[in-house]
Image (cartoon, rainbow, N blue to C red):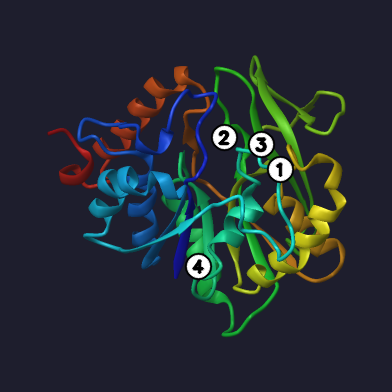
């Protein structure tokens, strides 16, 4: 099984390239923990989606190291990877979104696969849930996707707001709604507001939210291609800022009856550095996990 790690973005709020920021005394990165968990769960190949100009530094700091224990491949997110006949404004520099990122890896990915962000710590249980789901699919399955859903309380920072997709599922466990929202703690309660406008309201702390961890059958790549040109056509007036996003694509496919998406909850606790002030807590949390035996000390422990 392939794991696609989206590593082309820069962490603007964090203030640097989070993917190669050390988080323990052995100079490991968050991505090292994710790859360890993924391999333990049964993923046997990692595809790094990066900017081509970052290949040398990324391979020297991450790729060559993890290649010792898991197969590694690379794909590049480029703004000119578009449907035939389309162009973006020459002035645009920011990536075109997660759906375009996955589309850029279409010639590298094999079979069903999962995606994660490179700068988020997802936890071992999340990778186990994703791997179990992909293994459960019949050979040649199409349109059967899954979102690995977290309890909102397990995805928060005390240093500001975070962006999460609030999930709703039917009795069959299939996704019916994904609303991108801003979440924040207010004392011991979580408040959320849709990013497209709306009132900030209290939500249950055990609400299920998306952390952009999806499991996909291979046909999602065809769907991304089919829907790319219509997306660009609909955004001709905003090509400097529009983003082709995987949650939106999945929601549209569900609405049209072209796919389903299982909402699979995980007990994992997210750790991440949305803000520079988050780092000390993440470092301490990872150290505790090593001390508890969740990760081998010879790889993740002290020198």
Which residue position is annotated with label 4? 132
Q: From mark 2 to mark 3, how far is it between C-alphas?
A: 35 Å
Q: Secondary structure at mark 3?
A: loop
Image position of 64 with respect to 193: above or below: below
The tag on residue 155 is 2
Q: From mark 2 to mark 4, how far is it between C-alphas?
A: 22 Å
Residue 2 x %, y %: 45, 67
Disc 3 crowd, CA 10 A, few/some/many (<14, 14-19, 20+): few
- Mark closer to the observer (1, 2): 1
**Disc 3 to disc 1: CB gap under 8 Å:** yes
**Is 51 left or right of 286, judged from the image as shown?**
right
Q: Secondary structure at mark 2?
A: helix
**Is 204 left or right of 297, judged from the image as shown?**
right
Corner quadrant of residue 230: bottom right
Image position of 194 with respect to 59: above or below: above
- Mark closer to the observer (3, 4): 3
Residue 8 x %, y %: 50, 45
Residue at the location (24% across, 61% down)?
Answer: 69
Q: From mark 1 to mark 2, how far is it between C-alphas?
A: 36 Å
Residue at the location (77% across, 63% down)?
Answer: 227
């Amino acid at each position: 099984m392939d794991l696609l790690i989206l590593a082309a973005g820069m962490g603007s709020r964090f203030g640097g390239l989070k993917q190669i920021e050390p988080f323990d005394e052995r100079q490991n990165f968050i991505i090292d923990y994710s790859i360890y968990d993924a391999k333990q769960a049964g993923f046997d190949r990692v595809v790094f989606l990066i900017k081509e100009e970052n290949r040398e530094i990324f391979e020297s700091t991450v790729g060559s190291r993890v290649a010792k224990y898991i197969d590694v491949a690379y794909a590049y997110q480029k703004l000119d990877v578009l449907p035939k006949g389309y162009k973006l404004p020459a002035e645009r520099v920011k990536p075109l979104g997660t759906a375009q990122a996955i589309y850029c890896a279409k010639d590298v990915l094999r079979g069903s696969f999962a995606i994660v962000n490179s700068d988020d710590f997802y936890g071992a249980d999340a990778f186990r849930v994703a791997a179990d789901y992909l293994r459960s699919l019949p050979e040649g399955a199409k349109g059967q996707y899954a979102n690995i859903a977290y309890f909102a309380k397990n995805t928060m920072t005390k240093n500001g707001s975070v962006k999460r997709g609030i999930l709703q599922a039917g009795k069959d466990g299939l996704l019916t709604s994904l609303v991108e929202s801003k979440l924040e703690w207010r004392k011991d309660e979580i408040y959320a507001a849709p990013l497209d406008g709306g009132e900030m309201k209290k939500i249950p702390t055990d609400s299920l939210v998306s952390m952009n961890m999806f499991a996909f059958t291979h046909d999602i790549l065809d769907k991304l291609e089919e829907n790319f040109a219509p997306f660009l056509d609909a955004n001709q007036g905003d090509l400097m800022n529009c983003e082709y996003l995987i949650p939106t694509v999945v929601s549209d496919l569900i609405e049209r009856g072209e796919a389903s998406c299982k909402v699979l909850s995980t007990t994992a606790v997210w750790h991440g550095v949305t803000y520079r002030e988050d780092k000390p807590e993440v470092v301490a949390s990872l150290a505790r996990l090593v001390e508890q035996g969740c990760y081998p000390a010879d790889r993740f422990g002290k020198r």
